[in-house]
Amino acid sequence: MNLTYSSAFKEQALLKVYSRGERTIQSVADELNVKQATLKIWMKRKMKQVRQDDSDMTKEKRPHE
């Protein structure tokens, strides 16, 4: 059965993963009752989004004088 998680839940989950310290991703997944693979997919999507946002910012054109 596929579950749909809210954006807010995903963001909170990613915060837990990125601030987990010595804990494993699996332990965070167990705490949140989600699969480790699901967390890793969310992490990859977030990194892709961050890279895209960074790329967009560097491509901004200077205003015309």
Image (cartoon, rainbow, N blue to C red):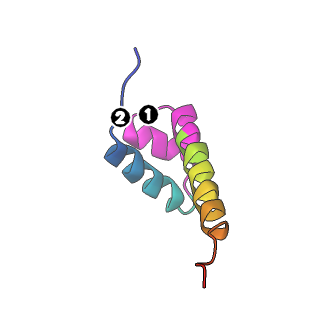
**Disc sitting over residue 17 in the figure:** none
Q: Is residue 49 magenta?
A: no
Location of residue 62 in the rendering, given as x and y in whole percent from the top left corner = 63, 77
Q: Which residue is mark 1?
A: 34
Q: Which residue is mark 2?
A: 5
In the rendered image, the quadrant that contains the N terminus is top left
Decide: is 3 above or below 59.
Answer: above
Secondary element type, mark 1: loop
In the rendered image, the quadrant that contains the C terminus is bottom right
Q: Which residues are magenta?
A: 23-41
- Amino acid type shown at disc 1: Val
Q: Looking at this rendering, what residue extends furthest in the top direction? A: 1
Location of residue 19 in the rendering, given as x and y in whole percent from the top left corner = 49, 62
Decide: is 4 above or below 26.
Answer: above
- Amino acid type shown at disc 2: Tyr
> How many numbered circles are shown?
2
Q: Nearer the viewer, residue 51 or 63?
A: 63
Q: Nearer the viewer, residue 62 or 46?
A: 62
The mark nearer the N terminus, 1 or 2, is 2
Q: Are marks 1 and 2 in contact (CB under 8 Å)?
A: yes
> Spatial distance from mark 1 to mark 2, Cα to Cα?
10 Å
Q: Nearer the viewer, residue 18 or 43?
A: 43
Location of residue 64 in the rendering, given as x and y in whole percent from the top left corner = 60, 79
**Residue at x 47%, y 46% (from the top left corner):** 28
**Residue at x 40%, y 51% (from the top left corner):** 11
Q: Is residue 24 magenta?
A: yes
Residue 44 in which image quadrant: top right
Decide: is 1 above or below 37.
Answer: above
